[in-house]
Amino acid sequence: MTLPDSLAAGDRPGAAARAVLAIHGGAGTLRRAAMSPEAEARYREALRVILEDGGRRLEAGENALDVVVEAVRQLEECELFNAGKGAVYTADERHELDASVMDGRDRRAGAVAGVTRLRNPVLAAREVMAHSGHVLMIGRAAEHFAIGQGVEMVSPEWFGTPQRLEQLRHAKASALGQVLDHDGQDAVGRGPIDEKTKFGTVGAVALDLHGHLAAATSTGGMTNKRPGRVGDSPIPGAGCYADDRSVAVSCTGTGEAFIRAVAAHEVAALVRIGGLSLDEACKRVLFEELPKVGGDGGLIAVDRHGAVHLGFNTEGMYRGSVRPGQAPYVGIYGGE
Ligand code: ASP
């Protein structure tokens, strides 16, 4: 069964009808013609498997924070997406990873930026939230802290794939400059979304059976980015936000613009203070606020009543949602 991109809270009464997990794997320009059915199927299958697992977790009563962290960890492990394994390259051919988590119950947040050796940056972000007393830690010190908390370390080369390296070389050769995850990967293009214009950050948002919200976001950033550059993904309020009073949001797109628009928090503010519906708030941010600062990309959001919005101002976004006991919805293109 497929669900539309925007759906009202479930039609069954009770918490299970409202509970929901949504995930994304980046947004960008479509290249349907250039894509093989096999490639498209790989993306859809990866999203479906992660959603089914998350749906079971919600059904078992796991809290939203655990569910979104696990969903993002699985997306990081999947090299189709620009986070963890398969992260894009910086201009000096390394990987600098950013991630964040936020718990809607008390608005506690944790994030890491510019880490190079942590297999699952989202797990490090959670440790920062739970045990550091801080919200955001960067670079080597963040790595030392996370490793001390038991987060797995890998060699910096572990994240790379031949496709991502070719993507960087293409970006440099074509003078594209800093490009969004799959920008510059035309010659490589493996998936249905044009790797030249795709933002490949991953994220998850959830409302659990207990009525709590959480969000998580993880990224390799933008291909050919300047070493030390940090985008919106690890910035609470920009690329990630959760507040039980309103919404949980995870973003993907041109990070600088999402920071300037404070995109995730803007959705929350429009719902909580402005009185807009989730759909109205997300569309206002995607089609009015972000374009004012040159922001391209998408976001996923769920509100405290269980309404879901999976929106983008690009041509497509890898995305999906699931409610406990129901089959997941998975989409790539607009209008499906
Ligand atoms: N938002 C991410 C960043 O600017 C990029 C992406 O979404 O792919 O780092």
Image: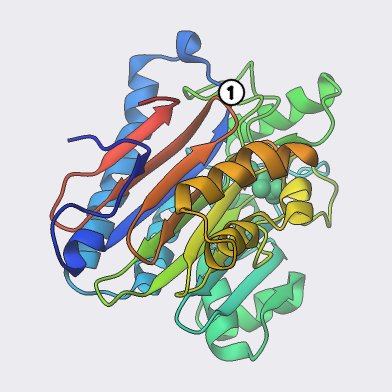
Front residue of this view, candidates 336 and 179:
336
Above or below — where is 238 with respect to 62?
above
**Quarter of the figure that contains the N terminus:** top left
- The residue carrying mark 1 is 29
Which residue does the image show at 57% across and 65% down from the upper left? Answer: 241
Percent position (x, y) of residue 317?
Answer: 49, 34
Which residue does the image show at 40% across and 25% down from the upper left? Answer: 335
Percent position (x, y) of residue 16?
Answer: 18, 64
Task: Report helix, strand or loop for mark 1.
Answer: loop
- Is residue 203 in view? yes
Which residue does the image show at 82% across and 19% down from the upper left? Answer: 174
Amino acid type of disc 1?
Thr
Front residue of this view, candidates 28 and 2:
2
The reply, left or right, for residue 241 in relation to residue 71 is right
Percent position (x, y) of residue 62?
Answer: 26, 74
Which residue does the image show at 42% across and 29% down from the upper left? Answer: 332
Above or below — where is 197 with respect to 104?
above
The reply, left or right, for residue 233 in relation to residue 70 is right
The reply, left or right, for residue 104 in relation to residue 235 is left
Front residue of this view, candidates 312 and 178:
312
